[in-house]
Image (cartoon, helix red, strand yellow):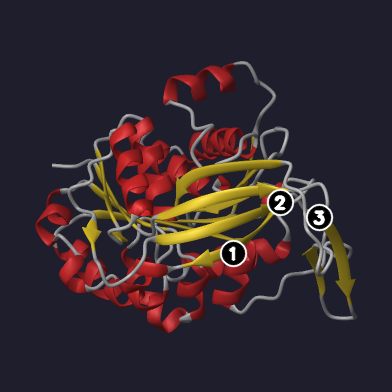
């Protein structure tokens, strides 16, 4: 029996950093965007290059295993060299690979991560086999025996498995955490209600929360001065109304927020030098869930440890290289007594 089974994507990632990259800002009355740009037609020199294995499902599985949980990953890969890299990583990190499905119809997921001098990134993603998970790929008996199931972002057609998995988990008393991605959010709340209602923990970023709840993000320049902004409070209340036990909204360098129906929580980011932000969200979400399990639903502590592990990721190339154990997280936390959680009762 597994402690945790993750369900999500598996990819081969290539990280590229070039000092020739430019960041251009564009804004109008209603919106603002930033563009990562290179000179058109030019030959661009690469300053740093790194290869790694990633994907939300694999990143979370590696983290859970590193934190001491008996973990298996459900993902779909091809039969190519990139598939070998994924399987080798699972072996290296003591993640059980028996639930991985291989297909010769599609290539393993592949991403090129373009990293700016500021540490943020633009991702060129080929979903490949990640988009083609189906109900026949789901090991129902293994899920039934697992204590927790963690659903990471799924791609396109793979989202058709969500309702059946949620129903099965509810019928068999399997606890679930849900960290939806862009494709799932675009399905709309009506398509996600069942899986969200079944989830003990629901985690997403602020823009995803805005899209799924329909609550507009208040521009920072006119937002209120409350520690927990009014738009975030509205989003957390709206997400909690869909009946997860805990709703969590992350907001980049502004930290993370949680709500259990009684208390709002706010946690600042843990200080770190940013090399690449890829994988920080996966590290945060999976560490939060792992901590909720270990520390008996202590939301404040889970936010702290998740923030520390996320900060450890952004300091390295790769979505798994900086991951800490619980012992290491506790030691870092003990040396930072001023790292506090703000709590506000409903």
Residue topped by disc 1: 124
Residue topped by disc 3: 21
Which residue is rendered at x = 30% and y = 62% of the image?
A: 78
Mark before the other along the chain sequence, 3 or 1: 3
Which residue is rendered at x = 19% and y = 64% of the image?
A: 138
Mark before the other along the chain sequence, 2 or 3: 3
Q: In the depicted view, which residue is nearer to us: 276 or 305?
A: 276
Q: Quadrant of the C terminus?
A: bottom right
Compared across the picture, whether 60 is left or right of 300 comes to left
- Above or below, 229 relative to 305: below
Compared across the picture, whether 256 is left or right of 20 comes to left
Q: Are marks 1 and 2 in contact (CB under 8 Å)?
A: no
Q: CA distance from mark 3 to mark 1?
A: 15 Å
Disc 3, SS: loop
Disc 2, SS: loop
- Above or below, 182 relative to 254: below
Q: Residue 330 appears at what percent x and percent y? A: 50, 21
């Amino acid at each position: 029996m597994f402690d945790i089974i993750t369900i999500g994507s598996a990819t081969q990632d290539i990280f590229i950093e070039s000092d020739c990259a430019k960041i251009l800002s564009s804004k109008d009355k209603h919106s603002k965007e930033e563009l990562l740009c290179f000179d058109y037609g030019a030959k661009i020199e690469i300053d740093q290059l790194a290869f790694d294995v990633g994907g939300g499902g694999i990143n979370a599985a590696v983290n859970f295993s590193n934190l001491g949980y008996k973990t298996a990953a459900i993902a779909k890969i091809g039969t190519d060299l990139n598939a070998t890299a994924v399987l080798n990583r699972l072996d290296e990190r003591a993640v059980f690979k028996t639930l991985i499905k291989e297909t010769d119809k599609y290539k393993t997921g592949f991403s090129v991560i373009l990293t700016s001098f500021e540490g943020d990134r633009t991702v060129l993603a080929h979903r490949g086999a990640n988009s083609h998970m189906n109900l026949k790929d789901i090991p129902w008996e293994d899920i039934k025996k697992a204590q927790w199931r963690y659903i990471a972002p799924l791609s396109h057609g793979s989202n058709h498995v969500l309702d059946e998995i949620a129903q099965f988990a509810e019928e068999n008393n399997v606890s679930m955490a849900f960290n939806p991605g862009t494709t799932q959010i675009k399905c709309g709340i009506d398509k996600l209600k069942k899986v969200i209602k079944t989830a003990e923990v629901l985690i997403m970023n602020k823009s995803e929360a805005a899209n799924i709840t329909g609550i507009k993000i208040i521009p920072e320049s006119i937002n209120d001065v409350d520690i927990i902004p009014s738009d975030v409070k509205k989003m957390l209340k709206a997400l909690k109304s869909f009946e997860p036990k805990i709703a969590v909204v992350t907001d980049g360098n502004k930290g993370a927020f949680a709500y259990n129906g009684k208390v709002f929580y706010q946690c600042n980011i843990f200080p770190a030098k940013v090399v690449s932000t890829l994988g920080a969200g996966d590290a945060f979400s999976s560490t939060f869930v792992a901590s909720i399990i270990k520390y008996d639903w202590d939301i404040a502590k889970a936010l702290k440890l998740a923030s520390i592990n996320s900060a450890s990721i952004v300091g390295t190339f790769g979505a798994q290289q900086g991951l800490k154990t619980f012992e290491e997280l506790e030691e870092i936390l003990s040396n930072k007594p001023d790292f506090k959680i703000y709590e506000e009762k409903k």
